[in-house]
Structure formats: structure tokens, C-alpha cells
Image: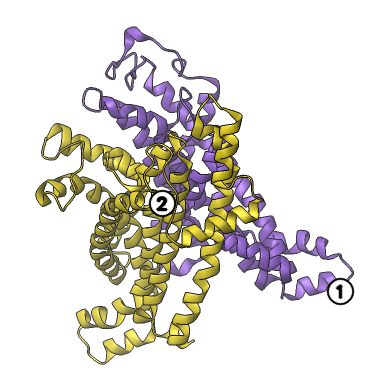
Chain colours: A purple, B yellow
Amino acid sequence: MKIRANTAIGGFLIGVLVATAVTAAFWTPFDPLRVNLRARLQPPSALYWLGTDEFGRDVLSRTMAGAGTSVTVAFLTVAFAVVIGAALGVVTGYVRGWTDRVIMAVNDALLAFPGILLALGVMIVVGANKFGIVLALGLAYIPSVVRVVRGTVLSIREKEYIEASRVIGNSEFYSMARHVLPNSLAPVAVLATSMFGWVLLAESALSFLGLGVPPPAPTWGNMLASSRPYMESAAWLSIAPGLCIALTLLGINLLGDSLRDRLDPRMAHG
Amino acid sequence: MLGYLAKRLAMTVPTLLLVAIAVFTLVRLIPGDPVQVMLGDTVDPAQAELLKQQLGLDQPIAVQFVYWLGKVVAGDLGHSITNGLAVLPLILERFQVSATIVLVSVAIATLIAVPAGLIAAWRQNSVTDLAVVGGATLLLSIPSFWLGLLLLLLFGLKLKWLPVIGYVPFTENFGQALAFVLLPIATLTMIEIGVLARMARAASIEVLRLEYVTHARAKGVPEWLVLGRHVLPNAFAPTWTLIGLVLGNLLGGIAVIETVFTLPGLGRLLVDSIFARDYPVVQGCLLFTAAIYVVVNLIVDLCYPLFDPRVAAE
């Protein structure tokens, strides 16, 4: 019963998010970048459902466009981290020896950084832009993927079917790509789900600090940052973007829980 | 026991070295010539060459690293480009602010979250459990900087109970200092309760299923004693590890909270220095925070045998 509620609410929230992001790519009520100084800081009304910001831009349109940016950045980052991390994890776990030791030493050093700090460091190097964030956050989360995949691979490589694949004359690379990799992806699915949430939060945090996606392109993080000076006179500016981040994270957390319950049913039933 | 401690301590040295290499490399990768940044646009080539020699930038990169590492180990993190102050004292001063907020909020969050998680696990799938899990998941999903903004809006601007901007050190005026850090601490506490309560619940559920719990109950041990004596100590170990990670992550991400509440902490120093292109300070902050993260996790691991003696025995 609880599992189904988790999946339903989580799925609904993420469904709305994706639908909004897709819609925003084609249509928003107003141009999210259009400045209209005569309509500065308007409270929510029939025309501007969520009000307007300090440049007279429509908050609803900007929030929708922000969903597009956040989903794109989070999706690309997770894909980047999972592809590179899974490849490194399979190689290091399967080949062992010096390759393993070197990759894991670097990996553990990166894990010794709090993720957001590492991302901050990389952002300084690559500069604040959309692809810089994907690179920075991707690099910050690759080490966790490597660790999880390597652990799974270490147990899989001892299985009979891998031995069998070798015996019938398949190359090491073929065995690795065809048999080890697909079988080590289940734990990555759970990790990737939570990672989507962390990345979204980290991107908002970086944009909030002014080190993420640069204005005028709207993201929920930089919208919150620019709402600060108007907190007293225009509180609506801080509500919509923050609520969107919170609801998205809630959706991700609920979906992650239901996914984990399915893979590890012991936690669901007493 | 001693073997475990020694092994864990020895593992820290290569980690710290790799952290130093990572920070050194990262800062060297920043585009632009540091000499040009320091001297500004009007560069006299001879002056630039002199400064380069003074900074050791004409040496091979490996030599630069060893030289730099030697100074770091001696506690010399260089001087700020913007104001010429020594970096380490600057960091330590700012770190006090961040550390106070983070430590106090994690301590309060633990005191609330662990009992809540334990009770939720004890009454698994009841209304209480659902309320704890639901509440924790909700708290987990709220971005700290948004919760901070909302609290500031409510208690600072609408109710006017607490100051909105500023900071006073505790040594100067305890009451005023408390008023300034109350909201940041409340924000972080609420966020961390979410993470910790879920972990405490999951760990307690695992332990409640074990046979010695059934045995204790069969012996007629009162339920509160079963929970307090047998379940809590064993369920606390995984939560304790998580507390270490939470502390480190909070320190790494403290900049957002310090930005919301305009506190002069370490995170704010890092972000301000990034904008000011004050790379010695940036480098110092990255290195210091990463080192603190390593040390916090070391302390957590060293204390681990207190909660789970099996670790040291292995």
C-alpha cells in the first residue's frame, strides 16, 4: 500500500516536471527573457499567474523554462557520470591489478571531497555555463558510480557464466562488455535516481551562488538568488522556484524509495 | 583495537596527499596567467618576470608542487591577492563561524532524529511510522537555501522577531550572536533531521529483526529497556557514519546558507574569493575544507569501535 503511494505520487510529480520541461521547449505564456519595465514586480494576477520579476519578466514562463534547464542539466550530468563511471568501474573491477589500484586511488581522492566542493572547484576552471555545470557535477559524481559498479563487478566476475564465456573463446573485452556490464547495472539504476535529485539540488545551489547557469537564462537557483533583494516587497518571487525544486526532489525521493523497496523488499514489510 | 586505530590513521596520509595534488592541479588549471591577475592590465614585462621568479612559477611544475606542499605542511597557505592578509588565519577565523553553525545543528538534529527513527522502526507501518517517514522525506526534499529564505521571510521580515542581516561573534555579545545564528541553525537542523531520521529508522528495522531482540523480549525485559539497551546502540553505528558524511557535506555546501543569512563563514569566503579571482584564498579554502572532511571522517571512523566493537576485532 505504502509502496504504491510512493510510486504514484513520485511518478506524478516527475511526470508533471517532464511535461512542463517539454512544453516550455515549445511554448510559454510569455517570452521568459522579455523585459517589460512597465510591468515590474507585479503581484500574481489573471494576466501574470505567478506575478512578474524586477525586470517585468513573467515568473510562470521563467519557472517553466527553468524546469527545462534543470531537467536537461540533471539528465545530461547523470548520463555523463553513469557512462564514464560504469565504464571505469567495469574495467577496474574486471582487469584488477595496477589499473585497478591507480584508478581506485584517484577515485578515493575524489571521494574525499564533498561533491559540491569538487563541483565548485571544477566550475572555477571551466567557467559558469550550462556545459561547465554538466562537466563539474558529472566529475563530482563519477567516483560514487565507479565505486558501486566496481563492487558489483568484483562479485560478478567470479560467476560461472563469465568463466563459460571465456572458455568458449570470447575475448576479455567481449566478456566484459557483453556479460559483466549489463549484469552490474541494477544497483546503478538506484544510484542514478538519487543522483538526479542531488544534481538538481547542486545545480540550483551553484546557480543560487552565481556560479551556475548565468542570467538572464532562468534556472530555479538563479531565480531564487535574484529574488533575495525583493523578499519583503515581492515575496512571490521566492515561492515558485523554491517550491518547484522541493516538489521535484520529493518526487525523486519517493521514486527512489519505491525503486529500492522493489530491489530490497525487506525494508518494505515488517 | 590499537591495530585498527593505527591502520585507519595510516590510511589518511595518502588520502591527504591526493587531496593536495587534486587542489594544486585544479588551481593550476584555471585559465589565465596568475601574474597578470595579480598585476592587473598594465603589465611591465620585467616586473612580471620578477614576480614570476618570486612566486617560483618559472620552476618545473613538480618542483612547484613539492615547494608548495612544504609550505602547506608548515601552515603557510600564502597571502590573499586582494588584501595581502595571510590565508590560514583568515580561513581559521571564518571557519569558527561555519563550524559553530554546522556542529550545533548536526548535534540537535541527531538528538531529535535518532529517537524519532527508532520509534518509527519500533512501530513500523503504523501511523507514527508513516508520519516520521513522510515528515523526514519532506524535510529531505526542501533545499536548505529556500527553507532559509522562507524562515527569514517569516521570522525576520513579517514577525520581526529576529534580525535579517548581520553577524556578531559569540565572544562579543552572546545574546546578539545567538539571535543571528538561530535561523541558520534551525534551517540546517530541519534539513539534517530528514536524512538522519530515515537512516536511524532503516538501521533500527534491521536490528529489531535480530534474534537477540526476540530473546531479550522473551526473557521479559521491559520494552523500553529492549529499545534503549539492545536496539539503540547497535542501530546507532550506521547513523554515526552518516553523521560524518553529513558534517562534511554541510561544510562543503555551507556557502549557500551563509549567502542566505549573510554570515561571514568559510563558504562565503570561498565564493567571494572566486568572484574576486583571489586564487591563493580559493586554493586555501578548497584544501582546508577537503582536509577537514577527511579529518572528520577519520574521527568518525576512530570512534566507530565505541559503537560497534566488532569493527576493531576484525
* Residue closer to the observer: B165 or B132: B165
Mark 1 lies on a secondary structure that is helix
Q: Quadrant of residue A207?
A: top left
Task: Give the crowd class for mark 2: few <14, some 14-19, many >=20 residues within 10 Å.
Answer: many
Locate residue B267 relative to residue A125 in the image: left or right. Answer: left
Locate residue A101 relative to residue B160 in the image: left or right. Answer: right
- Which residue is pictured at 23% across the width and 60% down the height? B108
Q: Which residue in the protein does label 1 denote? A: A167
- Across and down, in percent, residue A138 comes to 57, 46
Q: Quadrant of the N terminus of chain B?
A: bottom left
- Which residue is pictured at 38% across the width and 86% down the height? B211
Q: In which quarter of the image is residue A267?
A: bottom left
State whether residue B296 appears in this view: yes
Q: Which residue in the protein does label 2 denote? A: B252
Q: Quadrant of residue B63?
A: bottom right
| Picture mark count | 2
- Across and down, in percent, residue B216 comes to 29, 88
Q: Which amino acid does label 1 sit on?
A: Val
